[in-house]
Image (cartoon, coloured by chain):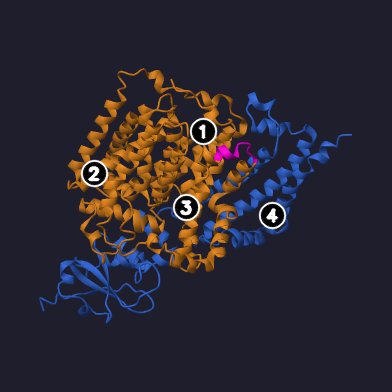
Amino acid sequence: MTELLILIVCAGALGLGVCRVIPGQNWPVRFGLAWGCGLGLSGYLLMLFVWSGIRLAFPSASVICGIALGAGLFLWKPWTQKALDERAGSGSLCRDFSPLEWIAVAVVAGTALAILLTVLSTPVKAFDARMIWMFHARLIADTGIHPAPELHDPAFVIGHPQYPPLLPVLQALAAILSGVFDERWVRLVPAGFYFAMGGLLWDSLKDAPQRLLLVSAWALMPTLVVFEEGGADSGLADVMLSFYVFASLWLALKAEGRLPQYALAGACAAFAGLTKNEGLVIAGMVAVVLWSQADIPFRAKLVFVATWILMLVPWLAVRGQIATLFEERYLEHLTPGRLLWGLDRAGLVAGEMARQMFLLPQRSGLFWWLILAWFAGSERRRDLLLVNGLWIVPAYLLVIYVLYLVTPWERDFQVHLSFSRVLLHIAPLALWAAVWRPDRRVPGP
Amino acid sequence: MPRSVWVRNLWLLAPGIFCLLASFGLGSVHFAGAVRHFFLQYIPGFPERLTAELLVIYWMTAIAGIAAVAGYLLLGVCRLEFLRWLLFPTKLRETVKISWRELLLLLVIVNSFAFTAVRFVRDGVRTVWLQGLSFGEKKEVLFSENPLEQNYIVGQEFLSGEGYSGGNIVILRNVFEDRPGEYLRAEHLHFSAHLFPVRVYLTYAPGCTTNDLPPGWMENRGIRWVVEDCGEHFQFDPKPYANRTAQ
């Protein structure tokens, strides 16, 4: 427990230090970015260590934490900066809440507490969490190597050996620091991204009409929490991926010419790809959104894309060496012949996707109705799509739809299995893109 | 001549009547059946939890219906002032016009509140249900809900049994299936994850015997246990493997 706290403090310090590139943010936003960027960078550093041949054990894990803490403090320089900058905007938001907004805040806080208690008191129950993510983390913690020798052996039974390692590496780091693989503590790592996302969404209130606090909080709640198999307390990587794709778009569109912030956005895009394969697709779409904005300088676009790609290259090289026993291999199935074969079930798959999106309240509440209605009722539909990047939602769903058509699983089986988690990936991004008003930007100092 | 406020707000009555019909009209048993049929077919097992959740949804629907009708009466009198007070901060209260967006907002709130409440109830019921069990026992109970994992305890008993003296496991399989993984079953993944750090391997063996494997294959992987999975159903029944070179 103490060791896990040390990891969080070190990664948090690094995150806070890096977040100095974004001036004038309030404390929930800083917390969100510190958690996400701090853990992302620490995990990335650790991956580079391990891939360069250094075995992951207590001494190397301590060195990582030391580097994170040192770099964080160096970048943060709390002793030289005026504390006023840190506190910019904090607290002022709560002064004029409506009664219902106060209820919303209370429920958000209560739900966060419920997540924490569930994580700390119950075993990891979700099938994929135990068969994939936790298992990969245990393998890394046991061997100290990634990819472990077992991953080169196609006979070794493990789900998705080629899945990206950011979450397992972080969980292995927490376990090695603790000296024992306690699934309760290591599950705090993905669960924490729910709180981090809350922090980042808080910022949308500054830009959007204030009553959107209510909408954001309430609408996102069932999407991220109630769905049991992929929710914030399940131990799966989906909430973590949601955070990184959202953070990437958020940082990029609010950078206002600050190159370090574009680099950080590119890093978050890379973290998305290092969390789940779907992150490669959505981060690519975020890059297109950025590239299509005429008022963003070319240099800034280049910084984003270069950071994103350069950070991904080592992983793509490592991934090629891993054997496969159980992988979906979607790209291999993506052939014209296979697509024609899949057309037989086109209606069935589309119908099931629509049903899960709009008709199953235990999966996403009325969240997608809300986004649809908000978009339909807006006078700035073109801006929402092109400037805010809301087009990512239909484009990503189209990609997923095509993949569902070519998958060798029977009929709409794969849709039943995974689509609600797919929706989770784009939920916070969709919410923010549907309500953000660039013209209400708070100018930086 | 302007229409009466009561008539103008008549649409507010529709969701209220719908909720009242769905709850009191159907009764709790049929209501639960309908919700199960339309919304909850993917949630596995755990009947106690489902009953409690459905009961909560039932009563929340009933309360929403009563509240909607009461709201209509209230709003009819005070011209949406209550809604304005509830939704908006003081600054906006006088200026904002109530539109369909605000009603959508209310719908989202009611819906989200219902499912967040279900979540709390579920956790509460589960906590009571698992009270007094150790962490390991909680695992056994929770995993037993999933048909693929009901034999979690079998693997644990194997590891802690007197017969087990170390070594890895191989599963021999001679059946291919037309799906990703080809001859991998979900149960294989389950046992591999739960028996770790014991390594579980899976290989194709047409005759379902270790003689199908090349020399040294077993020894290189430190295998001392063999599971034959060549029938219709998987059964975890490891048999000790005697090293061929030692023989």
Q: Residue at x 63, y 38 (%)?
A: A378
Which label was assigned to residue B73? none
Using the image as rendered, state which of residue A405 and residue A211 is in the foreground.
A405
Q: Over which residues does the magenta segment extend?
A: A377-384
Q: Quadrant of residue B28?
A: bottom right
Q: Are callouts 2 and 4 both on one chain?
A: no
Question: What secondary structure is found at the residue carrying circle 2?
Answer: helix
Mark 3 or mark 1: whose residue is earlier in sequence: 1
Which is closer to the viewer, label 2 or label 4?
A: 2
Label 4: element kind: helix
The kind of residue tagged 1 is: Ser
- With respect to residue A105, does A226 lie above or below? below
Residue on which disc 2 sits:
A48
Report, in whole angstroms, how far the alpha carbon at label 2 lies from the one at label 3.
29 Å
Q: Nearer the viewer, residue B129 or A439?
A: A439
Q: Which residue is mark 3?
A: A422
Residue type, label 3: Val
Residue A410 position, x and y percent, is 47, 69
The chain identifier of the residue carrying mark 2 reads A
Q: Residues within 10 Å of mark 1 (few under 14, many from 20)?
A: many
* Residue where numbered disc 4 is placed: B23
Residue at numbered disc 1: A204
Q: Position of residue A347 (x, y in %)?
A: 57, 64
Other-residue count near label 4 (Cα within 10 Å), few / some / many at <14 / 14–19 / ≥20: many
Report crowding for label 3: few under 14, some 14 to 19, many 20 or more residues within 10 A (C-alpha).
some
Q: What hue does chain A carry in this figure?
A: orange
Residue at 80%, 34% (x, y): give it: B77
Residue A264 quadrant: top left
Mark closest to the chain's N terminus, 2 or 3 = 2
Nearer-the-camera pick, A407 or B75: A407
